[in-house]
Image (cartoon, rainbow, N blue to C red):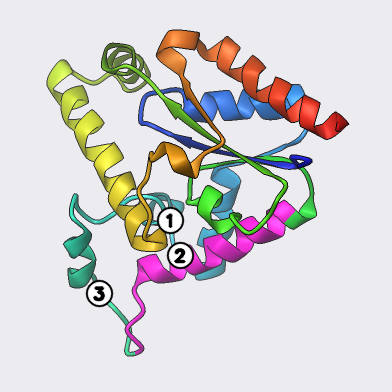
Amino acid sequence: MNNKIITISREFGSGGRYIGEKVAEKCGIEFYDKKIIEKVAQELGISEQIVAQQGEYAPAKSIFSYAFVGRDITGVSLADQIYSIQQQLIKDLADKGPCVIVGRCADFILSGRDDVLNVFIQGNKTEKTERIKELYGKSDAEVKKLLKDVDKKRSVNYRYCTDKEWGNRKNYDVVLNSSVLGYEKCIEVIADIYGKEKQN
């Protein structure tokens, strides 16, 4: 397999986005995260904030929450529209050239390709808590709630869109713990795998 695309799935607070961005820089390839949000928002004529939320997070922490969202006369919800456009956009970006794509079910969307390296970044609770407090200036109570809610909503959204389990090791080629390895080592490992595959 000759890896051309790297997808990064990550636990909240694990530094997955940062790792993905630095991997792209190290490998000299494109990085897509907020650019996807911007393009979907433009396509639908809605705010980037709505796309950021509904494109990766469930309305609540249960799959049943999707039963109560607003839908048009064809039964399609805004979340469905966002996913549909995201899906096509991610496929187009992958066809365009080598890149790193963060989140948004990219590992599943590109599962039919044989040139994708799927990575999952996890972390220990203590390190994730400190990172979130530092980045967002939240209290201990707020961070505890965020850690529980954000990943749960990501998990439910992933299940709704893919019918698969978010974070299941079987879905990924590489699973790294950024708390144990550190960000730089994670970056090095992913870039090294990518580089070796490109040479084969």
Mark 1, residues whose alpha carbon is within 10 Å: few (<14), some, or many (≥20)? many
Q: Return the residue at label 3.
A: 70
> At 87% across and 30% down in the image, what residue appears?
199
* Whether residue 28 is visible: no
Observer-nearest residue: 27 or 133?
27
The amino acid type found where label 1 is placed reads Val
Residue stretch rendered in magenta on the structure = 74-94
Residue type beneath disc 2: Ile
Q: Which of the image's four quarters has the C terminus?
A: top right
Q: Quadrant of residue 140?
A: top left
Q: Which mark is residue 1?
A: none
Q: Position of residue 68 (x, y in %)?
A: 17, 70
Whether residue 185 is visible: yes
For the residues labelled 1 and 2, the Cα–Cα distance comes to 7 Å
Which one is nearer the viewer's eye here, 129 or 42? 129
How far apart marks 1 and 3 lie (CA) works out to: 15 Å
Mark 2 crowdedness (10 Å alpha carbons): few <14, some 14-19, many ≥20: many
Q: Where does the image place residue 18, in percent across and percent down from the top left? A: 54, 24
- Outermost residue on the right side: it is 199
Residue contact at pointers 1 and 2, CB within 8 angstroms: yes
Image coordinates of residue 141 in percent, x first then y, are 12, 22
Q: Is residue 87 left or right of residue 24?
A: left
Q: Earlier in the sequence, mark 3 or mark 2?
A: 3
Q: Which residue is mark 2?
A: 82
Q: Which residue is mark 1?
A: 51
Q: Is residue 168 above or below residue 141?
A: below
